Image (cartoon, coloured by chain):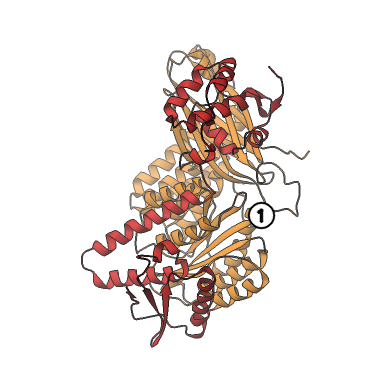
Amino acid sequence: MTTEELLIHELAARAGISVRTIRYYIEEGLLPQPSYQGKYSYYDLNFLDRLELIRRLKDSYLPLREIREIMSSLTDDEVRVKLKEQPVTSRNSINEQMPAQQAGKPGENALRYINRLMEDQTRYKTKGTGDKAETNLFRQNKILLQSKVSSPEASSTVPDQETWQRITLAPGVELNLRHPLDPDTQSQVQQLINFAKILLPSNPKEGTNETG
Amino acid sequence: MKQANLNIHLNSDKQLISKESATQRILEIRLQAPVSTNENNRPKINLALVLDRSGSMAGEKLEYVKEAARHVLDQLQGQDQVALVVYDDKILVLSRSINVTNGNRFELKQLISGIQAGNMTNLRDGWLTGCKEIAAAAQEGMINRTMLLTDGLANVGETDLEILAQHAFELYKDSVSTSTFGVGYGFNEHLLEAMANKGGGNFYFIERPDRIPQIFLKEFDELVGITARKVEIKLELPKSIEWRVLGGWSTEYKNGCLQIYVGDMLSAKTLDIYLRLHIPVDINPDDLVMTAKIFGQGEPGQVYEDQTKVEFQYADQKDVESTPENKELMERFSEVELAETAAEALKLERKGQRDDANRMLNQTINRNRLYISVKEAENYQGMSDRMKQGMTEADRKRSHSESYRLRRNKEKEEK
């Protein structure tokens, strides 16, 4: 037993996982509460053992609920005994097995959330009540948006089918794009559209089309 | 002395609670943000400017908005990101999120100059499109903020306050925050405030368009001065205690723990949050020692945390009554409670329930008379009287804006 104590970010660094994950484990009862001394919470080295055991249990595809049951029933000594028994199975790191809520880079969940909201709306609008004007308007928006946002997953359909997008820059002026575009071309096209908007400031009146 | 940590303190009006009947107690949570230690090292900013170009923005307003946007661009540096979205009933991404290099800044300004007024107001999609840009560009340690400006009522697409506020909260939880700017008298102040409150940002009422550039810069200063991001309070609160958090903060309650989402905190800022607790007679005395923890993120990889306790004790009713209360705390609380009631009453007044609004505010004035100055009482009485008559749009907006300032510990604006 050692008396070395770590701050949460030190523990995270030693275990090779994020501070967020440690918090999450504590909240979910996979890890015990740390000890508080004044302003900070301290984590003794037993936490490292516990994190390692959690990792191995996750690697053996045990559900979180069962891991919690096991972890909360073990003393620190039992954790070390278990570690000797529990084989190092796969290469999965703790991070890869985190639930969606906790994993990934900041903004990823937000992005998914927004995409879902906007998709719901598309479904609603296109199913709609036959309000053609609105539907067209919306499609036009969406395509205009896609001309900027145009992510490969949004535009790539069947790989060997050509998808063309027609963007009306101004009455009588159109731009035709074949999707998917590579990122460099995409950003150049973006600049072209932006520039065209300055040169030809009137709003597009005609709808734009995608032909497969 | 410069403080380096994020601190939390708990205080209550009294420590004693009655063992004969349920007792109401006021809990004050005081937060202090760490002081910025390195002024040259401000956080990276990932901004989306979402600008209303609906028909009503035409002319002076739009020109000031453009000026404001250009000013903000001048403050951003090569490490920062910015996206430009304009909306009316259509959404246009003028620029996806890009680094603010000198070259890009020049091009962005050109784009801004080209903005023209259009049709109706699809606030939701404009806002979400801006949020999408910053969500995609977000990195660890960045401050991701959408600045949403409008002068009108959202009248295309989803416009419901609760729903939009809920979206704002979901996005905030994944580091995408929202500040809102209402220009003139045509927007819905309750909607914009709710979006900012739940979105972890700030709300601004801009009465005169010529103030837009100044207010945009103010928001920018708020961003660069942030020393603690995504501040959260976790307060142990036994299930049988009824609670109410004042000030419109986002809260979640689960497993005996109340979580309050505070958003980002400015260097050295002190923030007071008030709870009204209704404590029954049958709580296990051990549960009357309540712990509150605070968490916040500093520079990348740096985490702030602190914790404190408050303890209540059962006593005979007469002892509860005879112990002196913390009068200063009650004065601070009264200010917030009156402002909170004023905001609620303003909502009623807007809906035409003038008598209800008037009655509600009067009751709160009377209840708090001990703790407020004569002048304050007169001001609120005046507001309450105007509610009975029906208010002008300018009066509604000004009264609401003042109430927002008081509820959220915002500094008074210099005119």
Is residue B399 at all visible to an observer of this figure? yes
Instruction: Report the chain shown in orange.
Output: B
Question: Which part of the image, by quadrant, shows the C terminus of chain B?
Answer: bottom right
The residue that appears at 43% across and 29% down in the rendered structure is A62
Residue farthest top in this picture: B316
Q: Is residue B332 left or right of residue B170?
A: right
Identify the residue under disc 1: B224
The residue that appears at 63% across and 54% down in the rendered structure is B222
In depth, the one of B30 and B144 nearer the eye is B144
Tally the marks. 1
Q: Secondary structure at mark 1?
A: helix
Write down the quadrant of residue A203 in the picture.
bottom left
Q: Is residue A142 left or right of residue A81?
A: left
Q: Amino acid at mark 1?
A: Val
Above-or-below relation of B127 to B112: above
Residue B247, horizontal then vertical, whole percent: 50, 42
In depth, the one of A7 and B161 nearer the eye is A7
Q: Which chain does the numbered disc 1 sit on?
A: B
Above-or-below relation of B402 to B327: below
Instruction: Report the chain shown in red.
Output: A
Residue A209, horizontal then vertical, whole percent: 33, 76
Residue A81, horizontal then vertical, whole percent: 57, 17
Is residue B330 at all visible to an observer of this figure? no
Question: Which part of the image, by quadrant, shows the N terminus of chain B?
Answer: top right
In depth, the one of B324 and B409 nearer the eye is B409
